[in-house]
Image: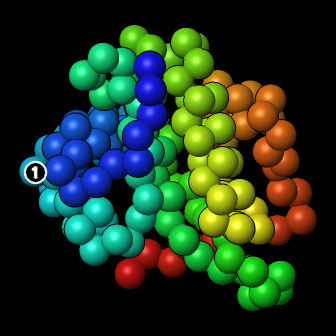
């Protein structure tokens, strides 16, 4: 298994996984929308995507969005998406992707990596905590649908 930084030509491989990721989170499958979304993020350089490959098969990805912390006056990465195919879960792909994200953050002089996950996604929470991520107990997360 090796991990690459995805480029525009990889968008279809990533989109298949991205579609599966969305289905995992109870969204309707829509491969065309997934392809369009991933293509736009890569083409417009709006996100960084790491793609895990076993031979030629895509088995996982991590998508990062650059952002900032106003209070800390520093750059951060939002780890918005992390997905590993069902058949390769537990094989170290997720940990390897998170290690690549950490290396990238250090290389880019990022202050921190932030993420959120579903409250019932115990497997992901265990992995994050095992790798040193700390759950935030100081702030509430809010959203407003428009």
Q: Is residue 51 left or right of residue 136?
A: left
Q: Label 1's element?
A: helix
Residue ID at (74%, 28%): 126
Image location of residue 129, percent across then percent down: 80, 35
Crowd band around label 1 with a 10 angstrom C-alpha radius: few (<14), some (14–19), many (20+): few
Answer above or below: position of 91 versus 115. above
Report the residue marked by disc 1.
32
Answer above or below: position of 137 versus 81. below
Q: Is residue 85 left or right of residue 76?
A: left
Residue ID at (59%, 19%): 92
Q: Is residue 121 visible?
A: no
Q: Is residue 2 left or right of residue 14?
A: right
Image location of residue 82, percent across then percent down: 50, 41
Q: Quadrant of residue 138?
A: bottom right
Image location of residue 48, percent across then percent down: 43, 59
Residue ID at (50%, 17%): 89
């Amino acid at each position: 298994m090796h991990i690459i930084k995805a480029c525009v030509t990889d968008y279809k491989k990533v989109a298949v996984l991205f579609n599966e990721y969305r289905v995992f989170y109870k969204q309707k499958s829509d491969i065309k929308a997934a392809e369009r979304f991933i293509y736009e993020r890569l083409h417009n350089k709006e996100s960084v995507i790491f793609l895990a490959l076993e031979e030629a098969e895509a088995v996982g990805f991590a998508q990062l969005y650059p952002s900032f912390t106003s209070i800390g006056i520093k750059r951060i990465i939002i780890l918005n998406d992390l997905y590993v195919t069902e058949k390769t879960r537990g094989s170290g792909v997720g940990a390897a992707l998170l290690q690549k994200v950490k290396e990238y953050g250090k290389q880019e002089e990022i202050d921190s990596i932030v993420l959120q996950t579903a409250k019932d996604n115990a497997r992901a929470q265990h992995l994050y905590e095992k790798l040193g991520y700390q759950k935030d107990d100081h702030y509430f997360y809010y959203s407003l649908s428009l």
